[in-house]
Image (spheres, coloured by chain):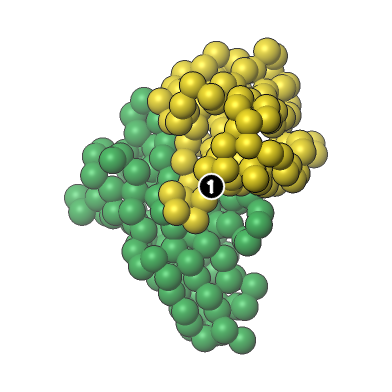
Chain colours: A green, B yellow
Amino acid sequence: SQQGEEDPQALSIQEGENATMNCSYKTSINNLQWYRQNSGRGLVHLILIRSNEREKHSGRLRVTLDTSKKSSSLLITASRAADTASYFCATTYNNNDMRFGAGTRLTVKP
Amino acid sequence: DAGVIQSPRHEVTEMGQEVTLRCKPISGHNSLFWYRQTMMRGLELLIYFNNNVPIDDSGMPEDRFSAKMPNASFSTLKIQPSEPRDSAVYFCASCEVAGYEQYFGPGTRLTVT
């Protein structure tokens, strides 16, 4: 399968802690994106990192990409209860084909 | 822009009935995607269009599923006849450039009894 795989499947932390989610993939990519999904809603784009980039920041989000290991990580710092959601990575290949992983379910306890 | 619009938001139907889901992408977006999401199988890409042309329908589960995009502002996903295992949330998404940020609609929750 070309799609990325997130790890862990589920993560539970206390408010204020950092949350780290990982995504691994198998073939060369054009870019990798992270999305968030609140229960019962559509996915919302968070951040895109291109294959020639190693790190990007957006507010409390930090994304890294290691193309040699074919992996990415999403770090959410100083988590809040409102960050409770599922987080998906999506990998885009050179033909612009984009596939979503199975997601990580994050629970932030107040 | 109002974002991606899907209708209906909820659909309950009996097995064997025809179901039509509708999507209006964001104006100016050239690519449109239909996804299905279930607890068991996660988020599955069913089909996507570029400039109204179907590019990849390999995710369409069976011949009972069909999708059309007659113009740049409208797409339908039809299931005929519907079966209980088709129960899922169906999302439509659009993007300006294939392979980049996708904007998702609110989804249609389909229940087939």
The percent coordinates of residue A27 (x first, y second) are 24, 39
Check the residue under mark 1 and report the chain it is in: B
Where A15 falls versus A102 (above or below)? below
Residue B67 visible in the picture? yes
Quadrant in which residue B3 is drawn: top right
Residue B93 visible in the picture? no
Q: Amino acid at mark 1?
A: Gln
At x 23%, y 44%, the residue is A26
At x 64%, y 43%, the residue is B112
Does residue A27 appear left or right of residue B81 in this picture? left
* Residue found at the very far right of the displayed protein: B2
Along the viewing direction, whichever of A20 and B35 lies nearer the viewer: B35
Along the viewing direction, whichever of A61 and A34 lies nearer the viewer: A34
Image quadrant in which the N terminus of chain A is located: top left
The percent coordinates of residue A87 (x first, y second) are 49, 59
Classify 10 Å Cα crowding around label 1: few (below 14), some (14-19), many (20 and above): some
Return the residue at label 1.
B37
Does residue B42 appear left or right of residue A29 in this picture? right
Does residue A48 appear left or right of residue A36 in this picture? left
Where A61 falls versus B93 (above or below)? below
The percent coordinates of residue B26 (x first, y second) are 71, 31
Q: Label 1: state its secondary structure.
A: strand
The percent coordinates of residue B96 (x first, y second) are 60, 29
